[in-house]
Image (spheres, rainbow, N blue to C red):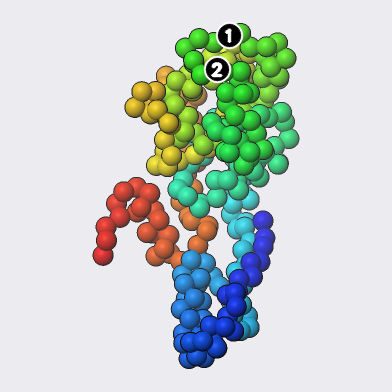
Amino acid sequence: ENYVAIINIDDFKEINDFYGVQNGDKILKEFGEFLNFIHKTYKLSADEYAILENTPAKLKHIATDIIKKLENSNIFLTGGAGVGKSYLTKKIIKEYSKNLIVVAPTGISAVNIGGQTIHSFFELSRNLSKLNKLSFPKKKLISYTDLIIIDEISMVSKNLFDALNKRLIEAKFRGRLLIVGDFYQLPPVNVEEEGWAFESMWWKYWNFEIVELKEIKRTTNPHFGEILNRLRDGSFKDK
């Protein structure tokens, strides 16, 4: 949650020796300004800089609030890149006291949150139109689960979301869903053929309460944050 990053320029003495101290000082100044543009940066000595990061208390409170909301609601946690979705998801996984399952559409996204792929966990094949019966142990596990977290929901197609829900019905799942992601980011691989998850009839069924994060945590520069948001929604115009 808290960290200090120390950044330096390799072999900076050679730059001073070859280009001169005056040019070296100019490089240090511009490099420091670049780092500070992205995140609050502190100059240490010579060519060293420090970036201090501490997770805002606000995000910790949001994680607590989401866990409380999950007692009565299904949640769609969304927002652009760098707003804290991954931090909140991992925080909820850590703090949630009941039985939970964590899945994601790809191997990499599943590893990032310590879960399994949707296909693997729900015993799905590539042909989503033909589902074999769930194994008894998996059916029992799902039936006793209180919360299922689905990360990177933007990459889950309508067909995959449909198949996942059929599995939940088969296992008589009575818990809550927490889905996480941003539909402005990566789409399903075959979105033209298989559609988006929100186009599934099951999307309306779960009646998700939307929790949208808007404040970018990866930078303290408001102008840079505004640029990222405009790139996200396609409203960016070169000035």
How many numbered marks appear? 2
Binning the other alpha carbons within 10 Å of mark 1 as few (below 14), some (14 to 19) or many (20 upward) gives few
Tell me: residue 51, above or below residue 179.
below
The residue type indicated by label 2 comes to: Ser
Q: CA distance from mark 1 to mark 2?
A: 9 Å
Binning the other alpha carbons within 10 Å of mark 2 as few (below 14), some (14 to 19) or many (20 upward) gives few
The numbered dot on residue 158 is: none
Q: Position of residue 128 (x, y in %)?
A: 49, 16
Q: Earlier in the sequence, mark 1 or mark 2?
A: 2
Marks 1 & 2, CB-CB < 8 Å contact: yes
Q: Residue at x 48, y 18 (%)?
A: 162
Tell me: residue 208, above or below residue 95.
above
The numbered dot on residue 125 is: 2
From the viewer's perspective, tell me whether residue 80 is left or right of residue 168: left
Q: Position of residue 81 (x, y in %)?
A: 47, 50
Q: Which residue is mark 1?
A: 132
Q: Position of residue 214 (x, y in %)?
A: 46, 51
The residue type indicated by label 1 comes to: Asn
Q: Residue at x 43, y 31 (%)?
A: 188
